[in-house]
Amino acid sequence: MPSTDLSPFQNRGWTRRGLLTGGAATLAGAAGCSSLVEPRTDDRAEAGPLTVQVPPTLFDAIHLATGVWNANPSPVGDDVIWSKIGTRPAFEERVANHFAREAAVAVDGGRSAPPFRVAVALGEPPETADSILDGTVDVGGIDSSHTPAGPDPERYFGDRIDEIYFHHVGREGWAFIISPALAEAGIDALTPGQIASVYQGEVTNWQALGGPDQEPFVFLGADVTGVDPAYESFLRENDAVPEALGARYGQADEFVTAAAERDNAIGVVQAGGVRIARDRGVPTLDVLVDAERRTVYDEGYPMTDDVYLYTLGEPDTRERAFLDLLSSPFGQHTLVARELLPVEPLAKS
């Protein structure tokens, strides 16, 4: 699927209800098949779509999930759609029909005619929280605070936080990756201080950390003025300046290639790039935090935060159906994992 290049909180003229067929349109455009998004004329359309409002960190994953829901493809057909998405779900029902039925929503949908439609839009956290509380938005997401404590929804929901239900979607942020040869040599977990020492240039040979007789090659993401990515915060929190930096990259493929094609590399990759690293045999680096080993999927792993969607009260049947899509193995590993770390570790493909 083509990525959506959006700056944080950039509106581009979209409104909360302005993307009624947005996700399906993305699928249709990619597949070259405009018939996937024919206007709805039945009674269900009059009820309005399920409205979802999220920040940029969640938008691409939710937009793709919305497209799959609204296209309502059959796992045993609709080959054009699945050629763009990849893995098909294990069940045989049309996607939206399957999750709607499981949530006790009436099911009679066909292709591009789900039991109900889903609309997704971008929103700033304060606006999204207010819209959830006043019922304008059914399901919403807010940015994490990128602090060691993780997201702070009480900041936005205030004294009504007890009315809010949390739905864990995945983890956002960045992961450390290393060359496969380093992992095979025993460099598969380091403390934050050891990682910082490598970037600082204090470790000039991997032998100092029990690894091979090689000088480290270290890399980071782009250095963008006015942006404070998690890897820069990590180095700052560990009093490190990346004096030994060998390169900076921008795309997940570049990060993964840098580690895959060298025997001595340590670097970072966006959460969505962990799937690419897994497929190419590039391991993530575990981090020893307070003597406990943390994988990139664990709470407390540096540079990552949990990501939640929120509903006002217990989700109703429509909300539950869409949330179940996101939390299912298909949703987690095929949709969510394109932009975020899924809740459970990805299996090797």
Image (cartoon, rainbow, N blue to C red):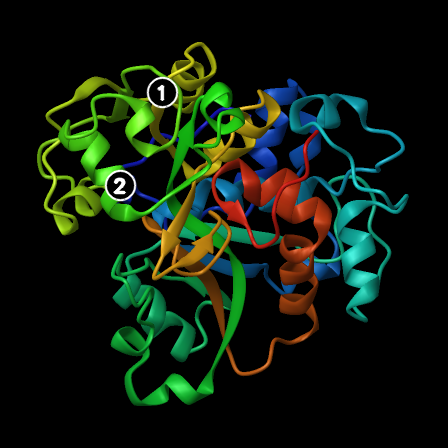
Q: Quadrant of residue 14?
A: top left
Label 1 CA crowd tier, 10 Å (few <14, some 14–19, many 20+): many
* Residue 220 image point, x, y percent: 26, 27
Q: Secondary structure at mark 1?
A: strand
Image quadrant assignment for residue 229: top left
Q: Mark 2 or 1, which is nearer the eye?
A: 2
Q: Residue at x 42, y 14 (%)?
A: 263
Vertical arrangement, residue 314 with respect to residue 339, above or below: below
Front-most of 344 and 61?
344
Which of the pair 93/113 is nearer the observer? 93
Q: Residue at x 29, y 62 (%)?
A: 125
Residue 207 screen position, x and y as percent: 33, 25
Residue topped by disc 2: 194
The relative height of residue 345 versus residue 50 in the rendered view (above or below) is above
Q: Which residue position is annotated with label 1?
A: 265
**Among numbered discs 2 and 1, the one appearing first in the sequence:** 2
Whether residue 263 is situated above or below residue 267 in the rendered picture: above
Quadrant showing the N terminus: top right
Whole-number angstrom distance, CA of label 2 to CA of label 1: 14 Å
- Callout 2 secondary element: helix
Rendered image quadrant of residue 197: top left
Residue 196: horizontal and vertical position, in percent? 21, 39
